[in-house]
Amino acid sequence: MAKDNTVTADRRQPRGLLFRLARGTALAYIIVLVAVMLFEERFIYFPHGYDGGSDWRPAGLEFEDAHFTAADGTQLHGWYCAVEDPREIILFAHGNAGNLAHRAPIVPILQRSLGATVMLFDYRGYGRSEGKPSEDGLLQDARAARAWLAEKAGIAEQDIILMGRSLGGAVMVDLAANDGARALILESTFTSLPDMGARQFPFLPVRWLMRHRFDSLDKIGNYDGPLFQSHGDNDQLIPFEFGRRLHNAATGTKQFYTCLDGGHNDLQPRDYYHELNEFLALQLDGRHATVSDD
């Protein structure tokens, strides 16, 4: 008489199904990990190239094209926006998207509120700058931009104020921590890219996967000059607490400005520039600033 295997087969079927599901899930997870590793740059940098549009001809802004070369030979581009008898010289590093033309509105504000000559520059792969973005590349680009600006303005590189927003803040933290600066201004800046990655992808081991680090939290303690930092308390991209942690790690004279109900891409309020002007005047010149409401 033949043995009836129906019960045995029925018991094994759920186990086989669970095994196949687990194997499929593990395979999908590995594929995601490999994709993140291979295409990491695409998750970090969102450059816009030069398109000749109206953004590149901002009304009322006078500038000189700056062409300079990074240490590895990459050809770079920036805008030198001068004022007569500047009180300060500022090098501005923008965030991870767009290009310098999208930041043109900040220039007249800094010129008027701080009496500053301002240089904007594009990282490699952005705007009219050649190459492809990477962490080492962006740091090289900032150093090349500062060297060009110092020579143009006729001052020492350490007499330039470094200003960075979002990713640009991380670029400027590295430059200030390694080479010094007259002052450091950070807007909506993170602690490190792995911290950001862990927040965006909590199910992935991004802290050991990521090649690009931009670890400002580790570096900022090596800068002991004046620091003015701001962050919106409603920033949905880079949490407010990241900005506070970064500020707490700084060791020099510092001030933190909270942009009330400010999001990541919101414009800075007028009072921000009043506070910034006063801070720089006191720390750099030992005087109270003359504030303009224009």
Image: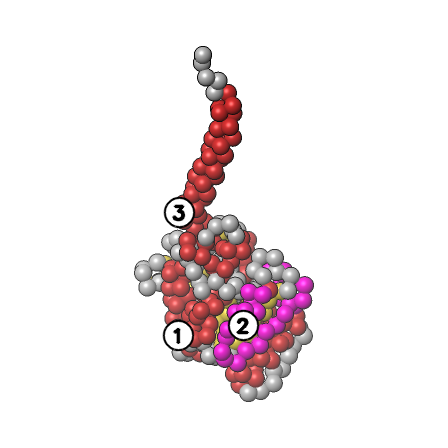
Q: Amino acid at mark 3?
A: Leu
Question: Could you say which disc has been placed on residue 154 in the image?
Answer: none
Is residue 259 covered in magenta?
A: yes
The residue sitting at 48% across, 68% down in the picture is 217
- Of residues 149 and 136, the one nearer the viewer is 136
- Residue under label 1: 179
Tag 1 and tag 2, C-beta contact below 8 Å = no
Indicate the position of residue 92 as horizontal and vertical percent values: 49, 67
Q: Amino acid at mark 2?
A: His
Residue labelled with disc 2 = 247
In the image, residue 209 sits, relative to residue 6, either above or below, namely: below
Q: Residue furthest left?
A: 72
Q: Which residues are magenta?
A: 241-269
Residue at 49%, 55% (x, y): give it.
Answer: 197
Residue 274, horizontal then vertical, whole percent: 63, 76
150 to the left or right of 7: left
Q: Are marks 1 and 3 in contact (CB under 8 Å)?
A: no
Describe residue 142's horizontal placement relative to residue 101 as left or right: left
Label 2 packing within 10 angstroms: few (<14), some (14-19), many (20+): many
Which is more N-terminal, label 2 or label 3?
Answer: 3
Tell me how far mark 1 sits from mark 3, CA to CA: 32 Å
Residue farthest along the front direction in this orientation: 1
Would you identify the image quadrant in which residue 244 lies?
bottom right
Q: How many marks?
A: 3
- The reply to whether the magenta stretch includes residue 29 is no
Task: Please name the residue that numbered disc 3 is placed on.
Answer: 38
